[in-house]
Amino acid sequence: MGRSVALVQRPKLAAPCGCLEGQRPGSRVEAFANRGAQTVIVRRLTGTDARTFRQVRLDGLKAHPDAFASSWEDEVEHALSWFEERLDSGYVAGCELDGRLVAVAGLHRSEGLKTRHRGGVWGVYVTTQARGHGVGSRLIERIIAEARGALEELSLSVAAHNEAAFVSTSRSALSASTRTRSRSAMPTSTKSG
């Protein structure tokens, strides 16, 4: 069984996220230098990133099959165009470390009338060589920022045995929750269970 971390925001904040409403936001890119003076860029991935996204995604599925709902066997069969469409039709963020894609995560929004205020983080993967550089936390923070204002609930699940991912995502959600509370003065909580 997995563990969940949820960021719950009520009411919706004032700054809506256009891409979740079908509008594409500008090319927002965040760059920073981490402890090792390496340049890390966090940005939205597009169809032009499909080849590198596919490789990182397949590496994650193969190396950690128990961490994902999808399987390597299913996704390796998809053509590159399938990955392009997935990137262009949804929101997927990526982290580049010194120009190389090393981490990915997606944001899913429920489509039902009664559930479209809910979303989920999917497909989070940080390559082995990029772990310990803070890219996973930056990626989760970017996903939370993208969801803020458009969603009231954002959840993600972490495999029960993946303590490092649970701690990292919990810390990111708590940090985002604290920033939300100071901006909105409304109760915001993180839940795990």
Image (cartoon, helix red, strand yellow):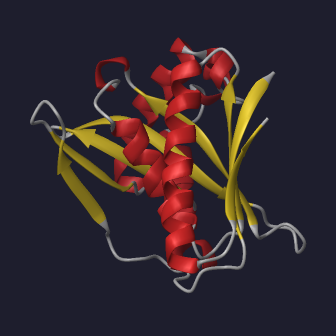
In this view of the protein, can residue 84 be seen by the observer?
no
- Measured as percent of width and height from the top left, residue 135 is found at 34, 38
Number of numbered discs visible in the structure rendering: 0
* Residue 129 located left or right of residue 179: left
**Residue drawn 67% across the image and 69% down it:** 151
**Residue drawn 75% across the image and 26% down it:** 2
- Measured as percent of width and height from the top left, residue 141 is found at 45, 52
The residue furthest bottom is: 14
Viewer-nearest residue: 163 or 67: 163
* Residue 75 located left or right of residue 39: right
- Measured as percent of width and height from the top left, residue 121 is found at 62, 47
In this view of the protein, can residue 59 be seen by the observer?
yes
Viewer-nearest residue: 52 or 114: 114
- Measured as percent of width and height from the top left, residue 48 is found at 35, 53
Quarter of the image containing the N terminus? top right
**Residue drawn 48% across the image and 31% down it:** 125
Q: Is residue 57 above or below residue 184?
A: above
Quarter of the image containing the C terminus? top right
**Residue 28 occupies quadrant:** bottom left
